[in-house]
Amino acid sequence: MKENYKDLFLLKKNLIFLNHGSFGSCPKIVFKAYQDWQLKLEKQPVAFLDQSRDFISYMKNVRMSLSKELNVQSNDLVGVMNATAGLNAVAQSISLKEGDEILTSDHEYSALEKTWNYVARMKKVKIVIANVPLPLISEDKFVDAFKNKMNKKTKILFISHITSPTSLVFPLKRLIKEANKRNIISIIDGAHAPGHIKLNITDLKADFYSGNCHKWMMAPKGSAFLWANKNKKNILEPLIISHGWLPNNYKSSQKGDFGNNRFIDSFEVQGTRDPASWLAVLDAIKFINNRHGIVIFIIYDNNNFFYQFISLNFSKNCFKTFYFVFRWNNKRYFFTHNSNIYF
C-alpha cells in the first residue's frame, strides 16, 4: 500500500502545502524529538545547559551528523538561528576599506540585500550587481557575467546557491575558482540548498557557506548552520559576544574555553537559549534518509506559475529531488537540482 505522506506531518487536513522554501513543515516524528529535547531541558535546566556537563556534547553530536550530509569537517561548522544570522556574522566580520567592492547578483534574497547595503553604508564600500543572463542555459555566460564585473577593488563575492526569488541553481564551482584566483572572498547563501540538493560544500572551495535546516530538511524552525573554510574561520566574530568569546589571535588552531576551537565556542556558547531546534536536526536527517519521498514539479510560463504536488512511492532520498520546467520565448527548458539537464 502506498503511504500518504501528508499523514506524516502536522499540517491542516484541508491544506496543500508547497512552500517548504519559506518555512518547511516539520514531520510529526521530528517535532516530537524537538519537544522531547525541550522537556529534557526543563527537567534539569542546569545540567542540560551547563557547558561543563551535557551542553557541549549535545551540540557536537549534531555538528558531526550534519557535517556528513554537507561533506565538511565538523570542526568548521556551527549552529546558528538561520542562514541570515550566519551570513550577517560573516558580512560584519570581514575587514573592508573605503572604495572596496562587493560583487553580487540580481537574484539575491531581499534580507541579505539589506545586510550588504548596511555594510556598504557603514564601511563606505560599493555594491556591484552582475545581471545573470536568462534563461540560465550557459555556464560560460553565467561566469562571464561576474568576471566582467571583477577588478582589483572587488573584495567579496556574495551569491546564492539556490536563488530565493527565481528558484535557480547557480553553477558555482567555476565562479568560485575564479574568485579564489583573484583573492576575492566567496560567501555563499545556501539557505535553500540543504535537503534540497546533494551538497558537497568542501568541493565548492568557497570561504563561507550558511544554510537552513528548517526549510527542505524539515527540521524545527530556528535551525541553521554556518560553515567556514578552516583557513578563514578565525577571522569571524559572533554577533553576540558572550562566555564563549575570546580575543582573536587570527590562528586557525586557536582553542576556545569550552573544549572546542574558538570559532565553535564563540558561536555556540552565547548565554541562555533553547537549543532544541538545533538538537532535533539529528532526527530530521534520519527522517530524510529513511523515508521515501516527494517530487515537486514547478512550471513557469511567462508570468504565470502552475504547481503540481505529486506524492509517489519513490526510492530512498527522493525528498532531495526537485524538478523545474521553464518556458521562455516559446522554448522549454527542463532542470533537475540533482543534474544539469537542458532541452
Image: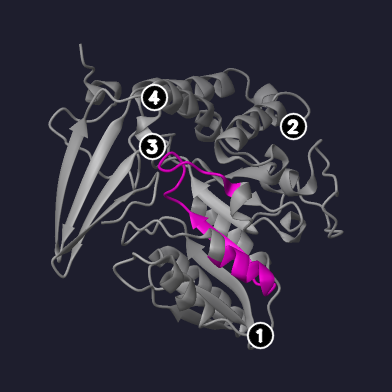
Between tags 3 and 2, which lies in front?
A: 3
Going by the numbered disc 4, the residue's amino acid type is Lys
Type of amino acid at the residue the image marks with label 3: Lys
Q: Looking at the image, which is closer to me, 219 or 245? A: 219
Give the labeled residue for mark 1.
152
Looking at the rendering, the stretch of residues picked out in magenta corresponds to 175-201
Query: How many C-alpha atoms fall within 10 Å of the one at disc 4: few (<14), some, or many (≥20)?
Result: few
**Contact flag, marks 3 and 2 (Cβ < 8 Å):** no
| Residue 50 on image: x %, y % | 72, 29
Q: Which residue is mark 2?
A: 51
Residue at the limit of the structure toward the top, as seen here:
1
Q: Which residue is mark 4?
A: 316
The verdict on residue 200 being magenta is: yes
Quadrant occupied by the C terminus: bottom left
Query: Which amino acid, by three-letter code, is at mark 1?
Result: Lys
Residue 320 circle label: 3
The answer to whether residue 168 of the structure is visible from this angle is yes
**Number of numbered discs visible in the structure rendering:** 4
Q: What residue appears at the point 28 percent right and 32 percent down from the top-left corner? A: 294
Q: Are marks 1 and 2 in contact (CB under 8 Å)?
A: no
Element under label 1? Answer: loop
